[in-house]
Amino acid sequence: MSRALLAVAAAVLGAAPVARAGAGAVATEHPLAAAAGAEMLRAGGTVVDAAVAAAAAVCVVHASSCGLGGGGFALVHRADGRDVALDYREEAPGAATPDRFFKDGRPDEALARSGGLAVGVPGEAAGLTTLHRRFGRLPLARVLAPAIRLAGDGFPLVEAPHLRREIERSVDLLRADPGLRAVFLGPDGGPPPADFRVRQPDLAATLDHLARRGARALARGSAAAAIAGAARERGGVLGRADLARYRPAWRRPLVGRFRGHRIVTFPPPGSGGVLLEMLGILARDDLAALGAGSATLLHLLAGGMAQGFADRARWYGDPAFGPVPLAALLAPPRLGRLRARLSAVRVAEPRAELASEHGTAHVSVVDAAGNAAAITTTINTAFGAGIMVPGTGIILNNEMDDFALAPGVPNAFGLVGAAANALAPRKRPQSSMSPTVVLAGRRPALVVGGSGGPTIISGILQVVLGVVAFGRPLEAAVAAPRIHDQAVPPVLAVEPGVALEVRALLERLGHRVIEMPAIGAVAAAGLKPGGEPAAAGDPRKDGGAAVARY
C-alpha cells in the first residue's frame, strides 16, 4: 500500500476509543507477558494497549524470538465490526540485491541466515507505535513500562525454559557477538548457570527512549547510526536511509467463512490466505464423524496442508511487487477440485528432515465488549542474525532468509520459494505469520496466532478446527497433538501425542512420518458463548494466559 493510501486508511479508521468492557483476556508465550497485558486492561487500556504491552514484554523474556530489531503483523477487530491489518514486516535494504548472496556463482544461503547481510530493515518500533497511536488509550510510556521493568530488573532464567533452551542451542552464535555473549552466556562463555538472571539494561534504556520519543528515536540519530553500523560492520548493507524511510502499511484483512463462522485473517505477505485455502479444502467434510486424531482425518488434513504450502511457495510474496491471485486460489470450484484429488493414496518419498523452530512470538487479546487484537512479532530464527547493536540491547533479525534466493534453494525452514518471493530492494518477504480472528456472529470466538516458522500455519489451522469443528474449549484445542505437512520436504511431521497405531496407518497410506517434539506454539483468546473472556497459552513454549476483571 502506498504512503498516500496509508494516510487515508489511518484517517478513516481514526483513534476512537473502545468502550471499557469490565473483563478481558490475554494469551501469549510467557506468564510475565500475559500479566503485562492484563495490567493494561485493568488500568483502563484498550485491547491494543494490552497487546502492545504483552508483545513488548514477551520480546524481553523470549529475546531469542522477537524484539525491536525485527517486525510483525497486527490484526485488530473492533466491536463495531471493523477489521484492520497493520503490516510492519521487515523489508530488504535498498542496496540488497540477489548477487550479494552468491559465492562463486552459486547461492550461499548461510549469508541470509547470520551476519550483516541477513538483516532486513526493522519495522517493530514503527509498527507498535503506529498501532498504539491509532487504537491505544493509555500513554505509550505506561504501556511499555512492564517491558522496561523486565529488561532493567531482569528475571531468573529458570522462569523462562524456552529462552534457556534457545541459549543452549545457540551458544556458538551468541559467543561470536560481544553483546549477546555478555547478556546471555555465563562468565566462561558457556551456557549460563542454574541461578542465572537475565538483565538487559541497554534494552531497558532503548525501550524508555522509544516510550518518550516514539519510533523516530530508533529511525534517526545516534540509534539509527548504531543499528546501521552494527549490520555494516558484519558485512551488511543496511543504511541509515533505509531506517528513515521505512513505513508500516495498513492492509485490508482477508475474510472467509467456515462452518458458519467468519474468518478474518492477514493478507500477503502474510499467510492468512493459505489458512483460508486449507479450511476451504476441508469445508464440506464431516470432520467430527471422521474422528479427531484418526488416521483418516490426519491424512486428509495433511493433504490440505501440502496443497496450501505448494500454492504459497508458487504465488505468495509482497503485493507491492506483484499480484497474489487470491480470488483464483480461494475460488470454491477450485477448492472442490483440490479436495477431490485428496482421496488418492500418497506415494512415499525419500527421507528428509525438518527444523524444529520456535522463533517468533504471538499475543492474542479480547475484551467482553467484543474487541480483539492479535500481534505476531519476529526476528525470524533464534537470535536472528546473531548481532546485538552495541549500547542498545537490540538483536537484529535475519529476515533475508525468508526470501527465495534462487529457484530450488531452501531457507532455514526447508521452504522453497519462487519468483513471487524473489529478493529485491525494499521488498518484504513472504511470511508464515497469520494473526486471525474467528467470529461467531459478532462475537470473537477465537483470537489466534502462533510462532514456529511454517508450523505457525498448521498450528493455527488445527486450533481453529479444534474450536469450530470439534467444539473443544480453548485450552484443549491448543494442547491437542498436531501434525505438519509443508509439501517440501515431502514428510509428514507428527508430535509425540499422535498414537503409534495412527502413525502406522499413515505410513501405509504413503506418508513418510517423522516425529517433531513440538509443532508450533499457539496463543488463543476468545469469548465463550455466554460472553466470558478466556485465554490459553501453549505449554509447548512457556505459554502464559491471564483473565483481567476491572
Image (spheres, helix red, strand yellow):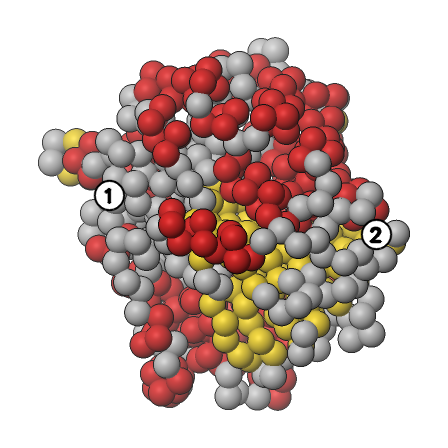
Question: Which residue: 45% across, 57% down?
Answer: 251
Decide: few, some or many residues near mark 2? Use Cα within 10 Å; few <14, some 14-19, many ≥20.
some
Q: Earlier in the sequence, mark 2 or mark 1?
A: 1
Relative side of 357 to 110, left or right:
right
Above or below — where is 199 with respect to 416? above
Residue 486 screen position, x and y as percent: 40, 62
Is residue 413 or residue 148 the one in the foreground? Answer: 148
Residue type at mark 1 is: Ala
Above or below — where is 177 with respect to 353? above
Above or below — where is 332 with respect to 20? below
- Label count reads 2
Residue 68 screen position, x and y as percent: 53, 32
Tell me if I can see residue 470 in this picture.
no
Where residue 424 is drawn, which disc sits there?
Answer: 1
Residue 267 screen position, x and y as percent: 43, 61
Furthest-left residue in this view: 105
Question: Which residue: 59% across, 48% down?
Answer: 134
Q: Quadrant of residue 62?
A: top right
Provide the residue designation for mark 2: 548
Is residue 253 or residue 167 the one in the foreground? Answer: 253
Tell me if I can see residue 136 in this picture.
yes
Residue type at mark 2 is: Ala
CA separation in Å, label 2 and label 1: 45 Å
The secondary element bearing badge 2 is classed as strand
Residue 503 screen position, x and y as percent: 52, 69
Question: Which residue: 64% across, 73% down?
Answer: 439
Where residue 185 is drawn, which disc sits there?
Answer: none
The secondary element bearing badge 1 is classed as loop
